[in-house]
Image: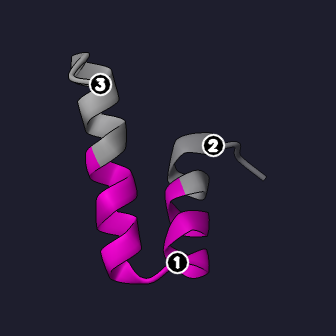
């Protein structure tokens, strides 16, 4: 199988958490990428 770690991780998070939690995690990740945290 092809390795798509990022996509796989997002899919995993969506399966393991509610949409609201997923949004919060994504927002935090984006903030970290931008150096806001």
Q: CA distance from mark 1 to mark 3?
A: 22 Å
Q: Earlier in the sequence, mark 3 or mark 2?
A: 2
Over which residues does the magenta segment extend? 10-27
Q: Earlier in the sequence, mark 2 or mark 1?
A: 2
**Cβ–Cβ under 8 Å for marks 1 and 3:** no
* Residue annotated with mark 1: 17
Residue drawn 60% across and 56% down? Answer: 8
| Image quadrant in which the C terminus is located | top left
Q: Earlier in the sequence, mark 1 or mark 3?
A: 1
Q: CA distance from mark 3 to mark 2?
A: 24 Å
**In the depicted view, which residue is nearer to us: 17 or 1?**
17
Q: Is residue 16 above or below residue 28?
A: below
**21 in magenta:** yes
Residue 12: horizontal and vertical position, in percent? 61, 66
**Between marks 2 and 1 in the image, the one whose residue lies nearer the viewer:** 1
**Between marks 1 and 3 in the image, the one whose residue lies nearer the viewer:** 3
* Residue annotated with mark 2: 5
Classify residue 18 as left or right of residue 3.
left
Residue drawn 21% across and 22% down? Answer: 36
* Residue annotated with mark 3: 37
């Amino acid at each position: 199988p092809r390795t798509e770690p990022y996509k796989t991780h997002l899919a995993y998070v969506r399966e393991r958490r509610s949409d609201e939690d997923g949004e919060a995690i994504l927002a935090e990740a984006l903030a970290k990428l931008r150096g806001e945290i």
